[in-house]
Amino acid sequence: MDSCCRILPTSSLLLALALCSCLLNSPLAHGRETITWLLRDLAPLTIASGPGRNQGAIDQALPLLRAALPDYDHNVLRVNRARASQMLGEPGLNCDPALLWTAERARSILYSVPSMNVLSNTLIMQPGDLPFIAGFMQDGKVDLSALLRSRTVALGIIAERSYGPVVDRILAETDSYQLLAHHGNEAMGSLLRMERLGRIKALIGYWQEARYQARQEGLDPEQLVQVPIEGAARSQFIHVGCSDSPASHRVLAALNSVLLDLRSSQLAEFYAQWLTPAERPAYLRETTALFNAHRNEAMSSQR
């Protein structure tokens, strides 16, 4: 018998046996590690409260990701974008299941293969403010760089969010006083209220996210319009991103094969259900084509 369970009076023996049992069944006794999943309130990917709670595309995908990692314990933590960025740069096993790839992030974050194709961010405005950007429109898209250089419009953004390479580059070249960067947990809702009050004329965000959050704020989503940004892709890939550690390498190696099997089918359907019926067929065709092209490119690079 283990030394912690040596002969003792009956009451002490029972206590010692219970302690031994707890130790033997603890995650540490079996070498189990805990993955902390960092979720942001980012409809339609993750929804923390209100209609559709826990029914976002990533909310529905997360159980499949966890099932692919049965040797780990799992913890879900809801944080804002800034806190998620901080935790991904810390030691440990922290993973964000809805992360855009950027060269800067890739210096300290490990990425999975692309997992989901999402429609890109756009300029979101009220119809009455469209005249402010009329001179910067061409073929239905706004020249965001020229608009910001004109210094005529204050723009709302979410702090530390990536909007894709084209928009990120434009924002990096813009004077900070023209950008209202919101750090809070309810950043999109706050920016929409500011836009409604006239404090900003436009914000950048996902169209589905803006419409969802408008309803949460008691605003009419039909009083919003989206304007595509010149040069930005119509859609972009998101990935699972994890803190850089040997454990994360093992986690992502296990996830990649699962993501390759699921991303054109179940994961695409989880996202498509948040689009209008008219949008879904084109989105699913485009997503299948993009992932097929990505797989072919990856196979070619390995030859």
Image: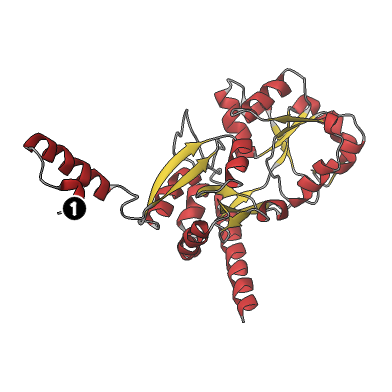
Amino acid at dot 1? Asp
**In the figure, residue 180 lies in which quadrant?**
top right
Viewer-side residue, 44 vs 253: 253
Question: Where does the image place residue 7, in percent across and percent down from the top left?
Answer: 10, 45
Viewer-side residue, 11 vs 225: 11
Viewer-side residue, 252 vs 135: 252
Viewport quadrant of the C terminus: bottom right
Left or right of residue 233, residue 97 in this image: left
Question: Where does the image place residue 154, in percent across and percent down from the top left?
Answer: 82, 28
Q: Answer few, some or many: residues within 10 Å of disc 1's Cα (few below 14, many 20 plus, some between 14 and 19).
A: few
Viewport quadrant of the N terminus: bottom left
Question: Where does the image place residue 8, in percent across and percent down from the top left?
Answer: 10, 41
Q: Residue at x 65, y 24 (%)?
A: 190
Name the outermost residue toward the right: 150
Give the structural element (helix, strand or loop) at label 1. Answer: loop
Q: How many marks?
A: 1
What is the image's colouring?
secondary structure
Name the outermost residue toward the top: 197
Q: Is residue 290 above or below residue 88?
A: below
Question: Where does the image place residue 88, in percent across and percent down from the top left?
Answer: 58, 46
Q: Is residue 224 above or below residue 172?
A: above
Name the outermost residue toward the bottom: 303
Q: Residue at x 62, y 63 (%)?
A: 290
Q: Which residue is mark 1?
A: 2
Left or right of residue 225, residue 135 in this image: right
Q: Residue at x 65, y 40 (%)?
A: 206
Q: Residue at x 58, y 20 (%)?
A: 218
